[in-house]
Amino acid sequence: MSAIRCRLPFLVIFLEGILLVLIALFVTYDEHTDAAAHSNETDHRHNQLYAIFPVFQDVQVMIFVGFGLLMGFLKKYGYGGIAFNFMIAVFSVQWALLVQGWFYHFHDGRIHIGVYNLLTAETACATVMISFGAVLGKTSPVQILILSLLEVPIFTATEWIIMELLKIKDVGGSITIHLFACYFGLSVTTVLYRPGLKDGHKDEGADYNSDKMAMLGTLLLWVFWPSFNSVFAANGHGQHRAVIHTYIGLSSCTLTTFAISSLLDKRGKINIAHIQNAALAGGVAVGSAADMMVTPAGAFALGCIASVLCTVGFKYLTPFLAKKLKIQDVCGINNLHGIPGFVGAIAGIATILLTTDERYGHGLYDTFPERVPKEGDIKLAELVGVLPHLKAGGGRSAWEQAQYQAAAIGVCLGIAVLGGTVTGFILKLPFLAQPKDEYCFNDDPYFEVPEVEEKEEFEFTNKNNANNNQRLKLPV
């Protein structure tokens, strides 16, 4: 893998140099961070930092620690899973600050940023992390940097179409993040299909220690997922509901996973890989409806449904996709993000249609800003008299909002599959140092790995066994 020695450093230095120039040219402070925008009379308690930074830190832990440890489940690719996750996460956030800035925060010829921009950049980063799971261990660090470079702007454009043009509700990202990232990643791995790995690879698996590390990643993601689903909900009751619904969905999902995993095994044994992944599926499934009046019972049911589908997917669907459809999904992102993402999208539509406006009261317009009456509507004037913070919306009915939600699913899938397919063909270019089959799922081509003297370890084990036998007065 000598090609990495030249190509990786050159690519990183080149990308960082370009980013430095672009940041110097375009990025400046927003009103919350610019010293010149404040005076001695400024009440700093209203600074955006105090409302966002605690949740931003939660999402930081999910992206850099939770995802990283979860990606470290391969027995000989622990360094790669964790370190490459770290590398592309940092680059994705840097790149997303610029790309999202041009889409959302560009005025007066500059991109104005604060801690809120760091938070939204990490949602773009999350999509890259999910997609990375489909090609984990089968791609070089050069390839995954290019994957990040291409996916971030495609995701941002998709999100802009869905959120700004279609104006759907998806605070937890079931559609915009999980569905997009999953089918983008699956499209990439389909193009990068390796016939030599159709029967598996000797290193494509976990061992006792790597599985424990991945389980720690699951626990961290589990604990902080309510923050992820609630951060973009309306302040107050919307965020409160999102936290409760996410926690309930995760808890019901977790216990259901233990039961289904045991049930699917002939000996009744639990598969730790099911727990690592399916225990999180409830957070994905609750995402779109997290801040809606889905009810605690509804969130509980969504968690159970997501768990069953995710666990069954790992047991039967992943092998089927690999053998029949040539989709080699290393981390099973279709089971954790794709299928629960569909469940979440459908749940959001159902909640919109089945929940009466009276259940929301005036909170309806905080939850669905696009359902606020249009400018000039008589009802809008009446509402502003009671709720002065309201701004004119699209005047949508529940049925119209549900239609836009359904349209967003199609838009998301179409762009994800097309973008992922094009990206896959780009990643196949020979100068991107794609590893040979024998080097897949192994840290050795990329890292200085401590040598384990198997002979000495074997002799040490035999010596200990001999000592134990002597203590028991057994023949050695």
Image (cartoon, grey):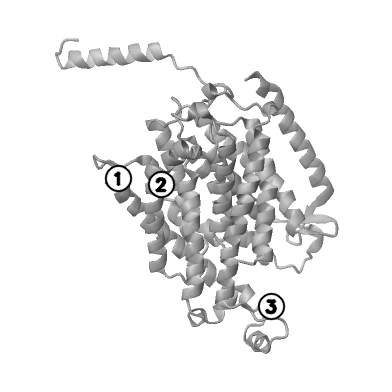
Residue located farthest toward the left when viewing the structure as drawn = 473
Question: What is the C-alpha distance between the residues marked 3 and 2?
Answer: 44 Å
| Mark 3 or 2: the one toward you | 2
Question: What is the C-alpha distance between the residues marked 3 and 1?
Answer: 52 Å
Q: Are marks 3 and 1 in contact (CB under 8 Å)?
A: no
**Residue at x-position 79% and y-position 46%:** 23
Rendered position, 167 above or below 189: below
Between residues 150 and 67, which one lies in front from this camera angle? Answer: 150
Which of disc 2 and disc 1 is earlier in sequence? Answer: 1
Q: Secondary structure at mark 2?
A: helix
Please say whether residue 235 is visible from this viewpoint.
no
| Mark 3 or 1: the one toward you | 1
**Residue at x-position 59% and y-position 56%:** 176
Dot 2 crowding, Cα within 10 Å, few <14, some 14–19, many 20+: many
Q: Which residue lies under the disc numbered 3?
A: 391
Rendered position, 393 above or below 141: below
Residue located farthest toward the front when viewing the structure as drawn = 324
**Which amino acid does the dot numbered 3 rest on?**
Lys
Q: Which residue lies under the disc numbered 1?
A: 264
Dot 1 crowding, Cα within 10 Å, few <14, some 14–19, many 20+: some
Position of 374 with respect to 70 (left or right) is right
**Which amino acid does the dot numbered 2 rest on?**
Gly
Q: Secondary structure at mark 1?
A: helix
Point out which mark residue 313 bears.
2
Please say whether residue 42 is visible from this viewpoint.
yes
**Which amino acid does the dot numbered 1 rest on?**
Leu
Between residues 239 and 432, which one lies in front from this camera angle? Answer: 432
Point out which mark residue 142 bears.
none
Residue 178 percent across, percent down from the top left: 54, 52
Residue 186 percent across, percent down from the top left: 55, 43
